[in-house]
Image: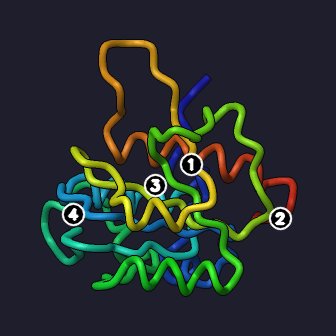
Amino acid sequence: MRRLTVEELGRLSVEAYRQAPKFPLRLALDHVRSRYNVGSILRSADAFRVEKVYLGGFTPAPPHPEIHRSALGAEESVDWESVADLAGCLSALKAEGFTLIALEHTTVSRPLWAFDWPAPPWVLVVGNELTGIQDTLLALCEWAVEIPQFGTKHSLNVAVATGIVLYEAVRHLQGRKSFS
């Protein structure tokens, strides 16, 4: 066994990535405070070909050295937008046919491994590192998923949790459309 070279990985250029088909999946970040988390989420959005990322509330936006450090340039490849009224944005997306899925511990959230994914397109809503998703936004979501944990902590880092859910979402979408 040997590690693949950069050439063998066949990564897309930023220009080719922006033209490539995306999965019918978007992200909405509600008051995520850490620039490093924003950068990591943008990097995961790039890895899983997310259509767009909405940065709501006081979520920091590129350009910023801390975002760039963890995004590794994904802030250039991923389509993102700062949104002053995230509730209005999500309401409009819902009216367009997107299903809003909260990544949150709620009274009705389902474990990620048992979640019965509805028909796409989807918007995954993730919240603040300490307070989670605002109640006004949670009320707009049709579904809630959670990542069960078995240690002393009740939550994962928001960027880590987002990456896990993106992986699972794309795994479910893979059979619906080809993205070679």
Which quadrant would residue 156 be assigned to in this image? top left
For the residue pair 10 and 43, the one nearer the viewer reads as 43
Q: Tell me how far mark 3 sits from mark 1, CA to CA.
A: 20 Å
Residue that badge 1 annotates: 144
Q: How many residues crowd around disc 3 within 10 Å: few (fewer than 14), some, or many (20 or more)?
A: many
Label 2 and label 3: CA atoms lie apart by: 19 Å
Which residue is the site of mark 3?
44
Query: The residue under label 1 is which amino acid type?
Result: Ala
Q: Earlier in the sequence, mark 3 or mark 4?
A: 3
- Spatial separation of the CA atoms under disc 2 and disc 1: 27 Å
Which badge, 1 or 4, comes first in the chain's sequence? 4
Identify which amino acid the numbered label 3 is placed on: Ser
Q: Which residue is pictured at 48% across the width and 48% down the height? A: 103
Secondary structure beneath disc 2?
A: loop
The kind of secondary structure element at disc 3 is helix
**Quadrant holding the N terminus:** top right
- Label 3 vs label 1, nearer the camera: 1
What's the CA distance linking mark 1 and mark 4?
27 Å
Picture residue at 33% right of the left edge, 60% below the top: 134
Q: Which residue matches tag 2?
A: 178
Q: CA distance from mark 3 to mark 4?
A: 13 Å
User: To which residue does mark 4 refer?
Assistant: 67
* Mark pair 2, 4: CA separation: 31 Å
Nearer-N-terminus badge (2/4): 4
Residue 65 position (above or below residue 51)? above
Residue drawn at (42%, 66%) of the image: 137
In the image, what residue occupies the spot 77% across and 57% down? 118
